[in-house]
Amino acid sequence: MMTDLLHPSGIHIQAEGPWPFVTHRSYTLAGRRIVWLARQHRKGLDLATRAVDAAVPPFWQGRRYNWSIGAIFALGSFLFMLGSMMSLISAGPWQPSVACTNLVFFLGSIPFTTAAYLQHFQAANERDFTLDPDRPGRRRLSWIGWHPRSAGWFSTFAQLIGTIAFNMNTFNAMVAPSAWLIQDVAVWMPDLVGSVLFLLSGYLAFIEAGHRYWSWRPQPLSWQIAFVNLIGCVAFMVAAITAFVPGSPEAPWIVPTSMVQLLVGASCFFVGAVLTMRESSAGSARPSGV
């Protein structure tokens, strides 16, 4: 949804975004055409377009910080990919033990939570929109924040809580008894909650990058990242649903299907993480796409 707004200063602003969020603004200030993008602003990828902040950005908007988020997500995704592949090896001398596989999943959940918090900290300290990009709004340093008008804040917060649920899911898988009811309560339920929150987070990130409830904009790198991560969230959701442990014997194809979906989701997250690392470098020169 695009609307024309009149700022109190008399400047006309074209604002766009899925209600209730504004994810794209464009206007002319002192003869200079300015495009403000929510994702780029939140991550500091538009610093090259500013005169003041480009010199000394806050550490959470620097290239190394953004690159580190991608690298840590890539590590967690790789370990989930490895755990999924280990689960699919059902016979032969190379078949890993269940305990070893569960340990790999748990180790993978830790980088997920670490990177998710680093990303949320970035969103918690996002600066307010101002007409003059050379004089951005200021905030006090915040650990969690509360920015109900920011799709990026809601996305990163949902993702952070989702990763904590995966910490519980993967840890309980190592220590919980094998009784089906306990498995469902202690292992499957946190998995389902985490997957729902990941799906919510992925969709919010997608609408932030695409400026609509649905978009097809394959050229901007920011949209590519959000889209591939959304596919990964859908795959994780399917994997969680099919991972339910019934009280009676289940069809033999269900567990492999769940693991394949988990592998697909983790692979998508790995690609998204690598693209995020690339975005951190691209953003130092110019915004990653309008």
Image: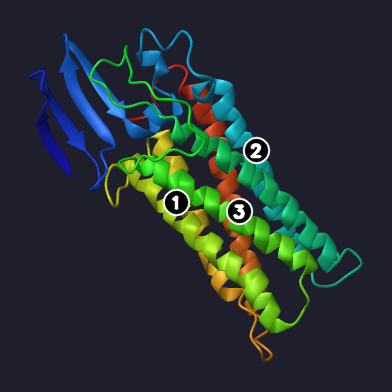
Q: Is residue 239 visible?
A: no
- Structure colour scheme: rainbow
Q: Which mark is residue 72?
A: 2
**Circle 3 residue:** 164
In the picture, the quarter occupied by the C terminus is top left
Residue 242 coordinates in the image, percent (x, y): 58, 75
| Residue depicted at 60% across the width and 65% down the height | 191
Residue at the extreme bottom of the image, as rendered: 248
Disc 2 secondary structure class:
helix
Q: Which mark is residue 150?
A: none
Q: Earlier in the sequence, mark 3 or mark 2?
A: 2
**Circle 1 residue:** 201
- Relative to 268, is 284 above or below? above
- Of the two numbered discs 3 and 1 in the rendering, the one whose residue sits closer to the viewer: 3
Closest to the observer, 215 or 30: 30
Residue 84 coordinates in the image, percent (x, y): 70, 61
Q: Amino acid at mark 1?
A: Ser
- In the displayed structure, does residue 244 sit left or right of residue 215? right
| Residue depicted at 76% across the width and 71% down the height | 176
